[in-house]
Image (spheres, rainbow, N blue to C red):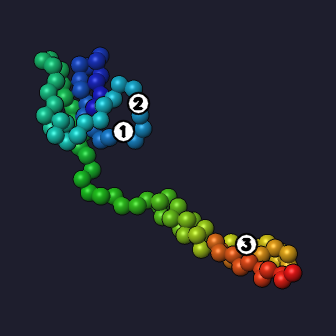
Amino acid sequence: MTYAYAESTAVLGPLAPFVEPHTYDLCARHSDRLTVPRGWAAVRLELETEPTGPTGDDLLALADAVREAARPIGVDEPANDESPARRGHLRALPTPASS
């Protein structure tokens, strides 16, 4: 909800995607019960009631996350006999030398 003081109008619409000064988020109960001062107009913008589903950007972000999670760790690291072998988050430790 926001006010247009110059036009004596209160505007009710969907929740703002980011914080703006002089705007207020109201729950459905308070939005339905809102009254304006005498001489003012209340403009109610219709909300989308049908779910829109994921966007193309959402699907691309999900695909990138899956690719990143499936990428083997340490594949392009050169093998070194002195360092323990690394595979994923587990490590194979070399057998300790007996003295």
| Label pair 2/3, CB-CB below 8 angstroms | no
Label 1 is placed on what type of residue? Ala
Label 2 is placed on what type of residue? Glu
Locate residue 21, reporting x and y percent. 39, 26
Q: Which residue corresponds to mark 1?
A: 16
Marked residue nearer the N-terminal end (1 or 3): 1
Count of marks, rendered view: 3
Q: Is residue 60 visible?
A: no
- Of residue 71 and residue 73, the one placed in the foreground of this image is 73
Rendered image: mark on residue 20: 2
Locate residue 36, reporting x and y percent. 16, 24
Q: Residue at x 79, y 80 (%)?
A: 96
Q: Which residue corresponds to mark 3?
A: 74
Label 2 secondary element? loop
Label 3 is placed on what type of residue? Gly
Label 3 secondary element? loop
- For label 3, the crowd category at 10 Å Cα-Cα, with few meaning under 14, some 14 to 19 and many 20 or more, is few
Label 1 secondary element? loop
Q: Is residue 66 visible?
A: yes
Q: Residue at x 35, y 25 (%)?
A: 22
**Which quadrant would the C terminus be assigned to in this image?**
bottom right
| Label pair 1/3, CB-CB below 8 angstroms | no
Q: Residue at x 20, y 42 (%)?
A: 28
Q: Residue at x 84, y 83 (%)?
A: 98
Marked residue nearer the N-terminal end (2 or 3): 2
